[in-house]
Structures are given as structure tokens and as C-alpha cells.
Amino acid sequence: MHFNDITYVVDHGIARVTLNKPEKMNALSWGSWAEIENAIAAADADDNAKVVLITGAGRGFCAGTDLTTGTKESDWPARPLGGRPGMMRSRYLGTASVYHCRKPTIAAVNGASVGAGFSLAMACDIRIASEAAKFSAIFVKRAIVADTGCTWFLPRLVGVENALKLMYTGKIIDAAEALRIGLVSEVVPAEQLAERATALAREIADGPSLAIELMKRLTHEGLTRGLDEQIEMEQFLQGITHNSEDAKEGRLSFLEKREPVFKGR
């Protein structure tokens, strides 16, 4: 699969998606969003890809929308999605494709993450930031309503009050403040970000992928379920995983007092 604005590589269970327009701080054109969707679809369909790691080339994670390029749909690469998303072919659904990815997703935020780039980071399951990272829901500075799912992701991560404060002001916050309010789970020195994000991705990739994917599904769906229904779904899906090869390996490794070797089935 050929990409212009990103790179996509699968290695040791990790699907690495790197936003690759460093001269523009990885700002995304509408075509860039279509490439991200294609990469996420490829990872979802690839049994060798156990986890998706998204980062940016150069000094920035993603500076938002690239306003210097054309937005003609005829210039976009083909999108993998059918139905309403396929008909709309809208960049605004790019973050949704990341959020709905079956595989675990990690954002390694290496620099500026603003506007649509802020939303892209929030669409991931886990965010690790370098000490150089900056975050902003900058939309209000352009006198426009936030998009790309920002108003949905942000209050779920940091609470309604913090979310509204950030969206009302467009304030730029540093990595330490992002950690304090729960926007990111870790902050590491810039030179350690790639190593730390890769280590976490490998730890997840080495885990029982079926159970992990189902726990992600349960967690997302549980946001709109009642407790009793959620417990019933946990029991149902645990029954499925209980009969898997990985579950048998988990029990055997415990009895043999060794680390399990999971195969994702």
C-alpha cells in the first residue's frame, strides 16, 4: 500500500503509523486523513498487527489541518469504509476510524498536538507525551467550532469543566499540565519517547490479543451501558475467551511457574 503523507510499517506486532510531513509539522490535508483511515483499516485486517502506534516525524506530532493544500475529493486516495462514512468521504471521520480500531492504539506525542491533531491524539486509547509536547483545542482562536470529535473526546478524558475551559480559551498547555488533568498517562524526556512507546506497544502486542480486543470493545460500549448489562456482557465474552488457546496457555504457564507465550488465538 502506497502512502504520500504517512508511513506505515508492521514490525514485531506493532503497526507504526508516522505522520510524515515534518516541514509542515505534520499538518493533515483531507488526503492525509484518508491515508490514516487506510492504514487503520490495514492494521485492523492484519493478524500480525496487534497494536497501532501513531506518532509524528520531526519536531511535531500534528499541527492540525493543512490549510495550504486543495480539498478536492477527487484528489483523495480511496477510502476503506463503506456506507455513510464512505459516502461522506469526510476528514472529520478520520478520528472516528482511529477510535473504532479493534486493535489497541497508542499516541506517542512528540511535539505540538493542536486542533485536529489534538483530536487525533485523543482518539487513541493511550497517550504518552514527551516533555516537549504541547496541546491545544485551538479552534476558538479561528472563531470556529471544534471538530474532528474534540467536543466528544475531551470531556471524556479530562471532565466537562476542564474540557470547556480548554475549548473556550484555546489555551496551549504543556505536557506536565496534560498529565495533571489526565489528558496523557505518561510524560518522558523527548529522547526516551520512542523507546518508551515502543516498549509499551510490545508489552501489549505480546499479550492475549483476543482478550485485549474484547476488553477494548467492552470498555467503549460500557460508556453507554448500565452496570448490570455490562456485567452480563463481561460474562458472555469471558466465556468466549475462556475456551481460547491463549487462555489455556495462561492457565498452564501459571501452573508451570513461567511467563505465558500467547499466540492470539
Image (cartoon, helix red, strand yellow):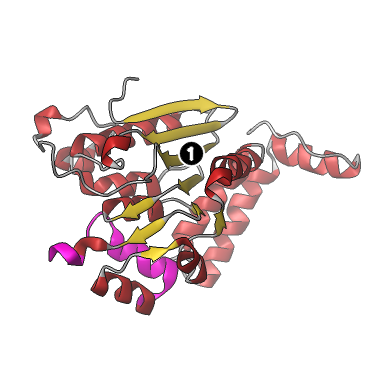
Q: Position of residue 228 (x, y in %)?
A: 54, 70
Task: Tell me if I can see residue 145 in this picture.
Answer: no
Q: Is residue 121 left or right of residue 179?
A: left
Q: Quadrant of the C terminus?
A: top right
Q: Is residue 106 left or right of residue 154?
A: right
Please identify the dominant SS of the magenta region: helix
Q: Quadrant of the N terminus?
A: top left
**Residue at image point 55% right, 57% down:** 187
Is residue 156 on the magenta stretch?
Answer: yes
Q: Position of residue 67 (x, y in %)?
A: 14, 45
Which image quadrant is residue 38 in? top left
The relative height of residue 32 versus residue 99 in the rendered view (above or below) is: above
Front residue of this view, candidates 227 and 153: 153
The relative height of residue 175 versus residue 210 in the rendered view (above or below) is: below
**Residue at image point 21% right, 62% down:** 139
Front residue of this view, candidates 85 and 69: 69
Q: Which residues, given as a range, are shown in magenta?
A: 140-160
Is residue 132 on the magenta stretch?
Answer: no
How many residues crowd mark 1 within 10 Å: few (<14), some (14–19), many (20+)? many
Q: Is residue 55 left or right of residue 141?
A: right
Residue under label 1 = 52
**Residue at image point 42% right, 43% down:** 101
The relative height of residue 43 versus residue 241 in the rendered view (above or below) is: above
**Residue at image point 91% right, 39% down:** 256
Kind of element beneath mark 1: strand
Q: Residue furthest top?
A: 1
Q: Is residue 255 left or right of residue 105?
A: right
